[in-house]
Image (cartoon, helix red, strand yellow):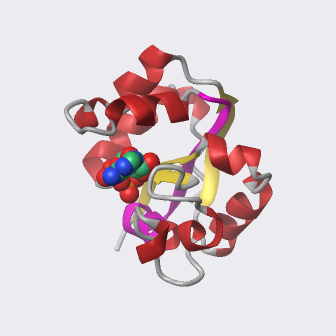
């Protein structure tokens, strides 16, 4: 295993539910420490660009509408095997299928409003981190 960085987003529903602190606290407990963090209200163009891989999916329009409905918290998390570990802590996309105790099982309202985003590969993590942060905004703590 190696130290990795991954992009995490607390989605608009997570901000609305006032669980920013709980989500960040959980990541810290799991050894996924924030090394960059800011709040941003995505424009339609920014959300469409971020989710460009899902452009052809039937839920793309709704997803962009949801992600632009209010501010989100974008973070870079750093830790051992951070990409996969973050996905484990998040749980399955659909909270009905998410393992007990995962963030989505605890806080998500449905398959769309599922509280957190996490990069799904090291390659996508690098791309997604660059989408929101410049090199000087990311502070390695390992
Ligand atoms: P994940 O976020 O677990 O990597 P995906 O990359 O497949 O999941 O999908 C991106 C996001 O699109 C999901 O987190 C969720 O917000 C939304 N989404 C996924 N599938 C659906 C669906 N069937 N209906 C509505 N929204 C969906
Ligand atoms: Mg995904």
- Image position, residue 13 (x, y; %): 65, 47
Q: Is residue 84 above or below residue 127?
A: below
Quadrant of the rendered image containing residue 103: bottom right
> In the picture, residue 139 is in which quadrant?
top right
Q: What is the quadrant of residue 68 in the picture? A: top right
Q: Which residues are magenta?
A: 69-88
Taking the image as shown, residue 1 lies to the left or right of residue 9, namely left
Could you tell me if residue 34 is visible in this image?
yes
Residue at figure coordinates x 68%, y 74% from the top left = 29
Front residue (pair 128, 4): 128
Lateral position of residue 126 relative to residue 9, left or right: left
Q: Is residue 11 magenta?
A: no
Q: Which quadrant does the N terminus fall into?
A: bottom left
Q: Does residue 130 appear in the picture of this structure? A: no
In the image, residue 121 sits, relative to residue 90, either above or below, namely above
Q: Foreground residue, 17 or 27?
A: 17
């Amino acid at each position: 295993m190696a130290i990795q960085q991954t992009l995490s987003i607390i989605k608009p529903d997570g901000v609305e539910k006032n669980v920013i602190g709980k989500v960040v606290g959980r990541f810290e407990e799991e050894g996924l420490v924030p090394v960059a963090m800011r709040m941003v209200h995505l424009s339609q163009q920014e959300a469409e660009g971020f989710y460009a891989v899902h452009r052809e999916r039937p839920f793309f329009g709704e997803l962009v509408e949801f992600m632009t409905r209010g501010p989100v918290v974008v973070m870079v998390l750093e830790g051992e095997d951070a990409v996969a570990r973050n996905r484990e802590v998040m749980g399955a996309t659909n909270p009905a299928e998410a393992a007990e105790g995962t963030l989505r099982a605890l806080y998500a309202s449905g398959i769309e409003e599922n509280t957190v985003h996490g990069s799904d590969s090291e390659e996508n993590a690098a791309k997604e981190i660059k989408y929101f942060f410049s090199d000087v905004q990311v502070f390695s703590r390992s």
